[in-house]
Image (tube, rainbow, N blue to C red):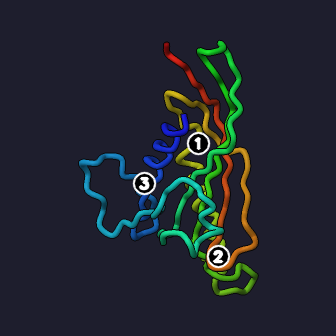
Amino acid sequence: MRKELYNKICTRLERLYKLPDGAVYEHENKEEKIPEGAVRIVNHIDLWNQNVEFIEQEENWARPAVFVEFCPIRWNAIVPGVEYRAEPEVKLHIVTDWAGAASEGSSFKEEALAVFDLPELIHERLTCLEGETFKVFDLVESQTNHNHEEMVENIEVYSCVAIKRING
């Protein structure tokens, strides 16, 4: 379940581009060329490993970045030894650069508040995502890190119904 979900999240986010006019372009057809001037919206995707806390020790990664954290999963046996279900939570750590103060009168206000645009776009693209081993992937909680320096971290918590079958 985790591998399939992670790969689907990556696939959805890797194909998002911003066009020069500000519109979002979704590159779904690999045969089609990416429009000139389009820039990737999410520059780095990886599994979460306390990346923000240990930024000086980490390999440098481009921002905006999304890190996927799988919370502990408690499985319930539907048919013991054969089929299990769970409702796991997955945290998406969305890390962007801090653009300055968002206070009234700040010349950086619009750029500073843009940190909330990416979580919204990601939610639009991931809501109700499904696969063979999970269903109904959807947003359940949003957290904003208000103790930051040069980066802002928004954590979007999703849950889904996970299915595990043992074929024997």
Disc on the earlier residue, 3 or 2: 3
Corner quadrant of residue 146:
bottom right
At label 2, the amino acid type is Ala
Q: Nearer the viewer, residue 100 or 148?
A: 148
Q: Is 124 in front, or is 65?
A: 65
Q: Nearer the viewer, mark 3 or mark 1?
A: 3
Q: Label 2 belongs to which residue?
A: 112
- What kind of residue is marked 3? Glu
In terms of secondary structure, where does tag 1 sit? loop
Decide: few, some or many residues near mark 3? Use Cα within 10 Å; few <14, some 14-19, many ≥20: some
Q: Residue at x 63, y 61 (%)?
A: 50
Where is residue 26? Give x, y as percent. Answer: 41, 52
- Is residue 48 depicted above or below 125 in this figure? below
Q: CA distance from mark 3 to mark 1?
A: 16 Å
Q: Give 11 or 112, whichever is nearer the viewer.
A: 11
Determine the CA span between mark 2 and mark 1.
25 Å
User: Horizontal and vertical percent for residue 2?
Assistant: 55, 38
Question: Helix or strand or loop: what does disc 2 sit on?
Answer: helix
What is the quadrant of residue 39 in the picture?
Answer: bottom left
Q: Please name the residue shown 73% across and 58% down the image.
A: 143
Quadrant that contains the N terminus:
top right
- Mark 3, residue position: 14
Mark 3 lies on a secondary structure that is helix
Amino acid at dot 1: Thr
User: Callout 2: 10 Å neighbours few (<14), some, many (20+)?
Assistant: some
Instruction: Provide the residue designation for mark 1.
Output: 127
